[in-house]
Image: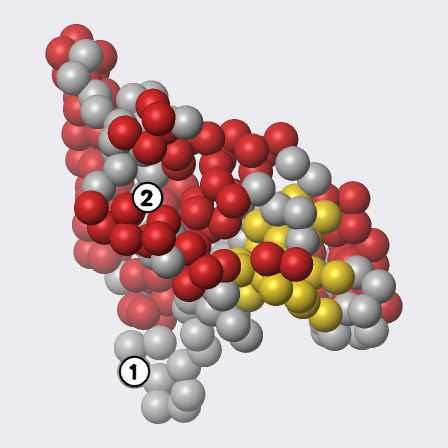
Amino acid sequence: MDEILADLSIEDTWWLRNFEKLEERIQVFDFLSKSVVPVNLCKVPWPVVWVLARYNRKHIWATRKLPPTEWMCSALQEFCHRMRWRWYFRDKKSARPSIWFRSNAHCGEIIDPGLQFWLDRFYQLVVGETVKAQKRAKRKKEAVSNMSSLVRWGIRLLKDSKWRACWTDKTSSYALVEKRQISTIHDDILDKQMYIPTVYNICMVDSHFKGYLV
C-alpha cells in the first residue's frame, strides 16, 4: 500500500481525506428496483471509485504503450463526416439536426470538390505525421505514463470485477451496472418501444451502447 500511495500529489491526498465527496459522484444500478443506490452501500472496491470519480470524464489516460493508428484514423473519419454535414447544411434555414452522434456518417450527398480535396489531404497529412511520431517514439523509448499506481490498481480491479461503468447524463456521473445484467437491460429498453423502427435493431443498439462503456 505504501508503494501505491507514494506517487500521489498533494491534491490527491486531499481527495483521499475527503473520500466521501468522491463517493457522492458514483451510483450503483439496482436491477430489481430499477433505480440507483449510493456506492457506499455496496461492496465496490474503493480504488474503483477513485478511478471513476477523481478525474474529469474527458481525462485521457496515457500509458507507455503507443495508441493504435486505427484510433487516429477513426477520429479523423468522424471529423471529416462533421465537416461534410456542416457544408451540406450551410444554407439551410430550417433547424439543423445535431451532429454529435456516436455515428455521424455522411448521407452521401455530393459536396464541394475543393472541400473534399482538403479533407482528403488533411487526412493523409495527419495519418502520415502520426506514423512518423510513432516511429520516433519507438526509437527514443521516452514514452511516459500519466497513470499512478493507484489508478492502475483501480482500473485493474474494475476490469476484473462484475461491474461495468456506464455514464449517465441524468446525474452527469458514472453508474456501476453488473455485466451479466446488461443484455437484459437492452432487451427491456427495446420492449418498451423507445426506439423508432428504423433503428429497432438489437445489434445496432448494442454497438452504440458499447461506445459508452469503460
Q: Residue at x 66, y 47 (%)?
A: 43
Q: Is residue 116 visible?
A: no
**Horizontal relation, residue 1 to residue 31: left or right:** left
In the picture as drawn, the residue positioned furthest to the top comes out as: 139
Question: In front here: 125 or 170?
Answer: 170
SS under mark 2? loop
**Horizontal relation, residue 145 to residue 200: left or right:** left
Kind of residue at badge 2: Ile
Q: Earlier in the sequence, mark 1 or mark 2?
A: 2
Which quarter of the rendering shows the N terminus? top left
Please state the horizontal and vertical placement of residue 116, each as a whole percent of the image: 27, 52
Kind of residue at badge 1: Asp
The residue that disc 1 covers is 91
The residue that disc 2 covers is 60
Q: Residue at x 69, y 61 (%)?
A: 29
Q: Is residue 129 visible?
A: yes
